[in-house]
Amino acid sequence: MNFEYDVVIIGGAFSGAATALMLKRKRPEARVLIIEKTAEFDRKVGESTTEVSSCYMTRILGLTHYLGHEQLAKQGLRLWFSSQPDQRFNDCVEVGTRYQSRLPGFQVDRAKLDSHMLHLAVRAGCELWRPAKVTNFELNNGNSQRVSTIADLGERTTSCRWIVDATGRATMFARKLGHFRPNTEHPINAVWARFSGVKEWDSYDWRERFPDYANDCRTAREWATNHLFGRGWWVWIIPLCGGDVSAGIVYDSRIFKFPEGPSLGQRLHAHILSNPVGREIFGAARVIEGDVHALSMLAYHSEKVCGDGWAAVGDAAGFIDPLYSPGLDFCSYSSYYVADLLARSLSGDHVTDRLNHYNQQYPITYRYWFESLYKDKYHYMGDADLMSAALLLDVSSYYLGLVRAVYRDPECAFLNLPFTGIGGRLAWNMMTFYSRRLVALANRRWATGYYGKRNAGWRELYDGFVPDIRLRKQISRGLLRWWKCELINLGLMLRRRATVPVSQPSTATTEAW
C-alpha cells in the first residue's frame, strides 16, 4: 500500500526522538514523521540518569560528547537520615560513595536533553511537525493507520504503516484503547521545583565547621543525587548546569501528608527546611517562580503496549517511581526494542513474534520491577539501618542483573527487557523476599518505637559499585546489615513477650516472624 510515511511518532521528547534516531540509523530510507505538540520542552520529574540509561545514551545513541559538555557528571547516590528536626548537621547519618563513580552517570536538564535528541532525529532525516496537536488516530490492523492533527497549516490527516506512542504520561493510546492501569498499590505523589541560592555541599565553609565531614569524602557530594529520607517520603536534590538545583518530594499518601501552606513552592521549601540537612543546604535558597510542579498517582502502566501497526515507548507504556531514576531505563529498553522491531518490519520481516513478546514481557518487567524494588518501600525508607541495607542490596542486584549485561553487549542487552527468563524470576524472588522482610522489620520498629533509633551518629562511605566480582563486598555489607536488623527484631519480639501480663493470653507467639 502507498503511505505518506512509514512511521509516525507522536511525541518528540527523549523516547520518541530516540526511537526515531535509532530507526533511521538501522534503516536510513525509512520515512519518519515526528509530531510534537509543544513549542518548547519542559522539565520532567527526575533529571538523574542511571548506569543503564547512561550506557544507552553514550554507547548506543552516541551522546558522550554532548553529555560531557552540556550536562553535569553524576557522582552516585547519597542518602541522609535524621531523627530530630533540631539535630546537628554533622550528627545526621550519611550513606554514599567515598570516591568518584566508576561508570558514567549524568545530572541532566531534561528540557535541554529532549531538545538535543529531537534535533539529532531531524538531522538524521526525520520530518517534524511542531507545534502540532494530534486530534485523532485510526488503527486498521497494520493496513493503513491514520493520524489527524492540527498544526500551523491547519488540519491534516496522514497515513502510515506504524504509529509510535511517545506521549509520556498522557499515554494517548493506553487511555483511548482502554489499556491504562493506575498502580493503586503504590499511591505516590510528587511536588518539585527549581531553586536558586542553594548552598554548595563542598564549600570552604564546611571544612571550617565540620572538618570530619569534609575530609571523609574524596568525591564531590554536590554532584551526587542527594536524598533526604523520612517515613513515607523522600526528597531529591539534583544540581543542574548553570547553578540551579532541582528539588522535589515524593511521598506515599497512605503514610505521609504533605504539609499545608500558601503555595506549592512554599510548602515544599518549608518541608525541606524542617529537615536538619535540608535546613543547612536550603536556608538561603529561593524557589524559582513559575517552575513549580505537582503530580498525583505517579505509578501506572499500559496493560497492552503494542499491536499490528502501533507500539508505545517510554512513559507512554508505564512509570513506577523516580527513586533510583528508573524512568530513562524504561525509555532506553523500550525505544531500542521498538526501533529494531520497526526496522525489521519495514525491511519485510514478519514481526508477529516480536510484537507478542513485547506485549507479554513488558507487564512482567513492570510488575517484577515494582515488587522487587518499590512495593511498600516507603514504610522503611525513613530508617537508616533498613534503607541502607536496601540500598546496598538493591544497587548490587541492579549491577549484577542489568549493568553488567549492557556494558558487555549493549545491542543485545537492550533487546531483552529486564526480568526475562529463569534468571529474571530468580532475581525477582530473591529481591522480593528481602524487600518484604525489610517492610516487616520497619512495621515492628514503628509499633515498638524503635523506628529511626539509629538515625544519628554514624557515616558509611564505601568504595563504589562495579559490575564484577568486587560487588561481593557491597552484597556482604548489605546482607550483614539486614541480618543485624533481624537480630534486633528478635530482641524486640522477646521484649514484647516479656511485657505481656501472665494473666492475659499472648498473641505475640502467633505473629508473623
Image (cartoon, grey):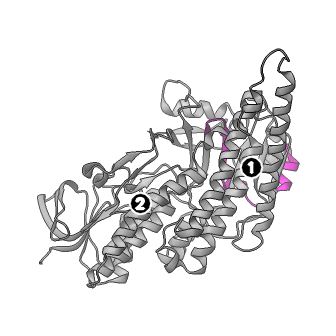
Nearest the eye: 311 or 43: 311
Res. 38 visible in picture: no
Q: Where residue 19 appears, x then y in whole percent? A: 37, 70
State the image coordinates of residue 137 (x, y, percent, origin top left): 18, 58
- Dot 1 or dot 2, earlier in sequence: 2
Q: Residue type at mark 1: give it.
A: Ser
Q: Is residue 199 left or right of residue 326?
A: right
Residue in view at x 49 percent, y 60 percent: 365
**Image position of 244 with respect to 36: above or below:** above
Q: Could you tell me which quadrant the C terminus lies in?
A: top right
- 82 vs 418: above or below: above
Which residue occupies the foreground of this view, 140 or 64?
Answer: 140
What residue range appears in magenta?
Answer: 209-234
Residue to which mark 2 is pinned: 314
Question: Quick one: label 1, few (<14), some, or many (20+) residues within 10 Å?
Answer: many
* x then y, percent, for residue 217: 81, 57
Q: Quadrant of the N terminus?
A: bottom left
Callouts 1 and 2 close, C-beta under 8 Å: no
Q: Is residue 466 at all visible to an observer of this figure?
A: yes
| Residue under the point 69% across and 41% down | 281
Q: Is mark 1 on a helix, strand or loop?
A: helix
Report whether 135 appears left or right of 494. left
> Quadrant of the rendered structure where residue 438 is?
top right
**Toward the viewer: 292 or 158?**
158
Q: Does the magenta stretch include residue 314?
A: no
Q: Distance between the residues labelled 1 and 2?
A: 29 Å
- Badge 2: residue crowd in 10 Å (few <14, some 14–19, many ≥20): many
**In what element is the residue under mark 2?**
helix
Amino acid carrying label 2: it is: Gly
Where residue 420 sits in the image (x, y, percent)? 52, 68
Tag on residue 388?
1
Where residue 280 sits, quadrant-wise, is: top right
